[in-house]
Image: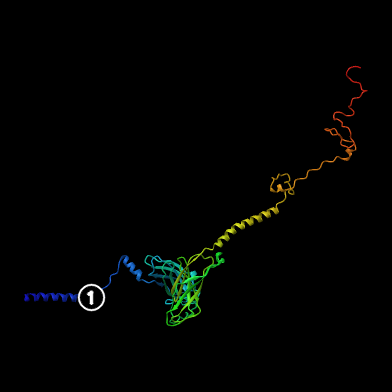
């Protein structure tokens, strides 16, 4: 039994050694094997996660009035981007001063394709601050992303960048908030104003003196507009300080805004701000639309009444009948005409008899004379009658 089991055991041990040698050889060769590219949706997701936004330029230098072509890749698909030429900027420190250091009027917007790439021409313009300059590309909506490419604007002045602070490192320790209230003038379109209050701590090994913060205001889905604000004071290592920075919007601003705080190119905090509509402006325009036409109508009617000729003086209009109006009700009644006096020459002839009553007009009359009898027609005793014979 022992002689028969020996060769079998020897063969099984040899197979184990061969398997172990094969596994060791495979493990040694595995890192050198090429990795096959992923396909389909998995490849797209892998590229979207690993890729970083990049920007390339057709020319590294050009003068004002020229044109360059900006190309990019690694961006979010179907993303809206804004391209600007900015001064006081480098690829490692970003745009110092935000969009206030950029030529905003000559900027161009572009939308990436399904692969996150774009290609767009833009004019060369001089930024409002000296170079070094970059072509700054950033997202307008959605998740924030940015990339810069070094660019030289020919003929534009160059100035050194401000020195960076030492080993100080600031961080927000408490929740930021907006303090302040709107006055009556804000209801009529005055610029809304608040104070951004926050507490920062110096986590670095060196003190920070007179730090320069960037306060940005964004309306809706648009990118924030940054403005530099310097806080006077020193924050020692391991110390904290309460800081208030003024924030002001444009006149007549209303809607949903977002206030952002940035230091050293890093966003430290964001605070929403809902601004009410200035209803006083709307009320003013409504009153203006009602009062002005009424005033013009009254002035016009006064002018027409002043210029219009009177009916008694106007030729050819005396015979026209004017309908009675409200003024006629308050007018004084017309005087009754006096009785016509009898001329004196008629009085000299004697009294006048009243045909109805038979009385004379004068006071001396004593008898009444009937109208059908006159002194000449009265019968006489001596006059013979015509009827019969005596």
How is colour applied across the structure in the image? Answer: rainbow
Q: As displayed, is residue 313 above or below residue 75?
A: above
Q: Residue at x 88, y 40 (%)?
A: 344
Q: Whole-percent x and y of residue 150? A: 43, 75
Up-down relation of residue 379 to residue 281 (above or below): above
Res 251 quadrant in image: bottom right
Q: Residue at x 44, y 78 (%)?
A: 201
Residue 268 position in % (x across, y down): 44, 74
- Rendering coords of residue 319 (x, y %): 73, 44
View extreme (top): residue: 389
Q: Which residue is mark 1?
A: 27
Residue 87 versus residue 250: which sits nearer the camera? 250
> In the displayed structure, does residue 62 sit left or right of residue 375?
left
Position of 166 compared to 368: left or right?
left
Relative to residue 320, is residue 15 drawn left or right?
left
Give neighbour class at mark 1: few <14, some 14-19, many 20+ (Cα, 10 Å).
Answer: few
Residue 137 seen in this snapshot: yes
> Is residue 152 visible to us here?
no
Q: Position of residue 98 (x, y in %)?
A: 47, 73
Q: Looking at the picture, tell me which residue is in the foreground, 187 or 214.
A: 187
Residue 258, placed above or below residue 374? below
Q: Is 264 situated left or right of 24 in this image? A: right
* Residue toward you, 386 or 228: 386
Q: How many marks?
A: 1
From the viewer's side, name the closer residue of 373 and 74. 373
**Image quarter hosting the N terminus:** bottom left
In the displayed image of the protein, which residue is found farthest to the front?
366
Q: Quadrant of the C terminus?
A: top right
Secondary structure under badge 1? Answer: helix
């Amino acid at each position: 039994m022992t002689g028969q089991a020996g060769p079998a055991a020897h063969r099984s041990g040899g197979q184990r050694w061969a398997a172990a040698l094969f596994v060791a050889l495979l493990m040694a060769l595995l890192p050198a094997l090429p990795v096959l590219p992923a396909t389909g949706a998995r490849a797209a997701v892998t590229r979207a996660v690993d890729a970083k936004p990049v920007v390339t330029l057709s020319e590294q230098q050009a003068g004002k009035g020229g044109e360059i072509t900006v190309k990019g890749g690694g961006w979010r698909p179907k993303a809206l981007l804004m391209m600007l030429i900015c001064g006081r900027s480098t690829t490692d420190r970003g745009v110092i001063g935000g969009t206030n250091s950029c030529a905003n009027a000559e900027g161009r917007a572009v939308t990436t394709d399904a692969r996150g790439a774009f290609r767009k021409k833009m004019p060369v313009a001089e930024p409002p601050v000296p170079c070094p300059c970059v072509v700054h590309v950033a997202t307008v909506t959605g998740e924030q992303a940015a990339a810069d490419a070094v660019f030289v604007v020919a003929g534009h002045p160059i100035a050194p960048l401000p020195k960076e602070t030492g080993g100080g490192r600031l961080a927000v320790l408490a929740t930021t908030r907006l303090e302040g209230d709107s006055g009556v003038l804000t209801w009529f379109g005055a610029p809304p104003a608040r104070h951004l209050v926050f507490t920062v701590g110096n986590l670095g090994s060196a003190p920070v003196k007179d730090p320069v913060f960037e306060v940005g205001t964004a309306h809706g889905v648009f990118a924030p507009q940054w403005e530099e604000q310097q806080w006077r004071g020193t924050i020692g290592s391991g110390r904290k300080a309460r800081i208030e920075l003024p924030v002001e919007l444009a006149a007549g601003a209303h809607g949903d805004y977002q206030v952002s705080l940035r230091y050293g190119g890093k966003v430290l905090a964001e605070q929403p701000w809902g601004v009410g509509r200035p209803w006083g402006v709307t009320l003013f325009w409504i009153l203006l639309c009602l009062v002005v036409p009424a005033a013009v109508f009254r002035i016009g009617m006064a002018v027409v009444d002043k210029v219009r000729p009177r009916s008694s003086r106007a030729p050819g209009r005396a015979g026209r009948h004017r309908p009675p109006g409200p003024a006629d009700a308050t007018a004084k009644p017309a005087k009754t005409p006096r009785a016509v006096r009898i001329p004196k020459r008629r009085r000299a002839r004697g009294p006048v008899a009243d045909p109805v009553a038979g009385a004379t007009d004068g006071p001396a009359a004593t008898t009444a004379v009937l109208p059908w009898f006159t002194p000449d027609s009265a019968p006489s005793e001596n006059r013979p009658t015509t009827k019969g014979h005596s």
